[in-house]
Image (cartoon, rainbow, N blue to C red):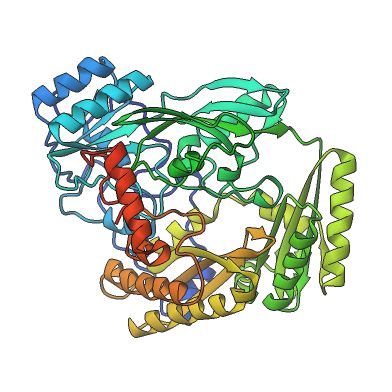
Amino acid sequence: MVHHTDAELPLPPMKWDAWGDPALAKPLPDDIKGLLSAALGVSASDTAGPTAEEVLLRPSALSPDDLAAITAIVGDGHLSTADADRLPRSGGKSTPDLLRRKSREPQDAPDAVVLPGSEEEIAALLALCAERRIAVVPFGGGTSVVGGVQPDRGGFAAVLCLDLRRFDRLHELDELSGEAVLGAGLTGPQAEELLAERGWELGHYPQSFRYATIGGFAATRSSGQDSAGYGRFDEMVRGLRVVTPAGLLDLGRAPASAAGPDLRELFLGSEGAFGVITAVRLRVHPLPTSKAYEAWSFPDFATGAAALRAVEQQGTGPTVIRLSDEAETAVNLAMTDKIGGTQVTGGCLAVTVFEGTPEQTAARHEATRAVLLAAGGTSLGAEPAKAWEHGRFNAPYLRDSLLAAGALCETLETATEWAELDRLKAAVTEALQTSLKQTGTDSLVMCHISHVYPTGASLYFTVVAAQQGDPLTQWAGVKRAAGEAIMANAGTITHHHAVGTDHLPWLGQEIGELGVRILRAVKDTLDPAGILNPGKLVP
């Protein structure tokens, strides 16, 4: 295929050097820029990166014979080496990803993009790539924030982006069992639209919902904002179809089984390193017919966390329950004097949402409300919770605006038992603040709980500081300090962002040397040539 710049394939829906839809991006207001400058020394200037037309990509390393062999498998119109197709698939959407895209030096990108249309085509592609030593990176929505879709050649001759967007069907809906089989390339909105046409819902709404895919949710153990009501994505999975270089696996035969270890677990969280997920059978539920909202204020984070624990351990049934700490609540107030039209005067803001039939919604709301009142909460009414839901997918746009204003802004997450929650939060906050201070800047560290379990909860941190020197080097040191604090204080290195490249240094510490050997044995069995997503998941 002749190299040229015009896109030949359907493009991912997100801008190549930012999150999401450019039409939804908004610059920071001048008063917020002033606050950042006064509080953190953030410069209002931004280093302009190249336009898409100005970006220099390393030339494709695939030979004409390689391209002809791939085209023979997938047919004309499903393979491209065009820069306009390679660039949007050149990585994920973390802060380091976006900072790297400001470079005017030659940038990494897949050597070609291929869109297979069947499991047979994927199997043939994997066999060809193993024979010709071409790495393969499965690609869904490109929303990874941990380096999970970096086009790493890993010592191979070239790297191919295997885009799954043609796997976009609702294959089956079993209304009696409450299960649906969805193609791995469906985005969150596409899947919900197909189900809603039949009166059903999956109910998985992570922040990446608008762009991430069913296969990506499974491959990263995604957790959505409605997890209190519907569970994490891996809890929804009833079956998987996976094409590996060693063959096809169709896993999950019954609601529960004692037929040995559950092999589905090998691929939930496998990040494309063991095989290519093509379809997922999922638990679904009828569309809710009723919804209720209530926001709450707690005097401090410890009181609020204890209240969330009581709700979860008593099983009162909210669909959404989350708690912002004092810093995050204060920032929300700094952005507006009211939240959802309601005056809030500090403390910690909590949000609850309830769904189901009218009877279920009312009962769950009443039971949860009683627990939160008894735990020291003050009701703020429905409007702040509705306001949160209205903007629930928009935080990454604010991150991009902060970067453009000269701030360093990034997120990280973890989870632990309730007994360790305060210690872990304090340790990570201190590690972030201290490491940033060492780079010459003060920082703002915010945290919230967004996923709760009977035995523990997640902690999601957002950090804002001034960019100092090379911001990539600056953040690498900060991330290292936070990772060490997590591992030293009973946390998991990742609750729902996955491992990718960013968390790989700590995976051995989390699962142990024997655990690493098990992962390597699985990799060697399913992908003996090691072509699948090199440099991710397996230390």
Question: The N terminus is located in which quarter?
Answer: top left
Q: Which of the 4 quarters of the picture holds residue 247?
A: top left
Q: Is residue 37 visible?
A: no
Residue displayed at 41% across by 79% down: 41
Residue 117 x %, y %? 37, 20
Residue 232 vs 258, above or below: the answer is below
Q: Specify the farthest residue to the front.
A: 259
Residue 183 x %, y %? 49, 27
Residue 523 vs 247, above or below: the answer is below
Residue 520 x %, y %? 30, 50
Relative to 132, 152 lies left or right:
right
Relative to 60, 80 lies left or right:
right
Residue 218 x %, y %? 49, 41
Residue displayed at 70% across by 26% down: 177
| Foreground pick, 395 / 108 | 108
| Foreground pick, 393 / 152 | 152
Residue 188 vs 181, above or below: the answer is below
Q: Is residue 364 visible?
A: yes
